[in-house]
Amino acid sequence: MVPACVYKGDTIPAVRLPNVYVFRPLKFKNEKERREYYRLVRNVKKTLPLAREINRAVIETYEYIETLPDKKAREKHLKLVEKGLKEQYTPIMKKLTFSQGKLLIKLVNRQTDSSSYELVKAFMGPFKAGFYQTFAALFGASLKKEYHPEGEDQLTERVVLLVENGQI
């Protein structure tokens, strides 16, 4: 069964087709560049579902917090959310490589339209946000990294669109 619409007495099947992205074929200068591209594809496939899950958790938490009556109840709920997220995601995050972690920071920015630093600051406070930013900086990463699909992250955006659409 497919959805249908009736137009002047005729029943017409209405099928929604997904977007199909067509990009110019990539030309790699050497084998190393080709391997880096396929590493990016593998990393996007691993981190994109995490970024989506983080976006969902942020939206749900924000919507629920808005319904709470006072600041004390909000803080109590945020503590529970933080504890639950740590229990759930710490084992997953520990398995990520350094490059996957940096990519996840950018994909979270893409999904939520906020930097990871801003999210931590909003939900856990400026002290913890500063701590996590400093910790990330020790390893050469930054929670304040932004995603630029038209600039430096153009190849990543291409891969993300193709993965989201099931084309790779």
Image (tube, rainbow, N blue to C red):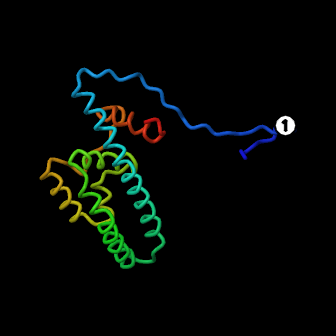
Q: Position of residue 33 (x, y in %)?
A: 24, 27
Could you say which is closer to the camera, residue 63 or residue 84?
84
Could you say which is closer to the camera, residue 131 or residue 55?
55
Q: Residue furthest right?
A: 9
Q: Residue at x 27, y 57 (%)?
A: 93
73 left or right of 35 in image: right
For residue 34, what is the image quadrant? Answer: top left
Amino acid type at circle 1 is Asp
60 left or right of 107 in image: right
Q: Position of residue 99 (x, y in %)?
A: 23, 44
Quarter in which the C terminus is drawn: top left
Q: Number of marks in the image?
A: 1
Give above or below for 109 relative to 93: above
Task: Quickly name the residue at label 1.
Answer: 10
Give above or below for 151 relative to 60: above
Give above or below for 77 relative to 95: below
Q: Position of residue 87 (x, y in %)?
A: 30, 69
Q: Position of residue 77 (x, y in %)?
A: 38, 75
Q: Residue at x 15, y 51 (%)?
A: 137
Q: Residue at x 48, y 39 (%)?
A: 165
Q: Residue at x 35, y 77 (%)?
A: 76
For residue 88, what is the image quadrant? Answer: bottom left
Callout 1: helix, strand or loop? strand
- Neighbourhood count class around disc 1 (C-alpha, 10 Å): few under 14, some 14–19, many 20 upward: few
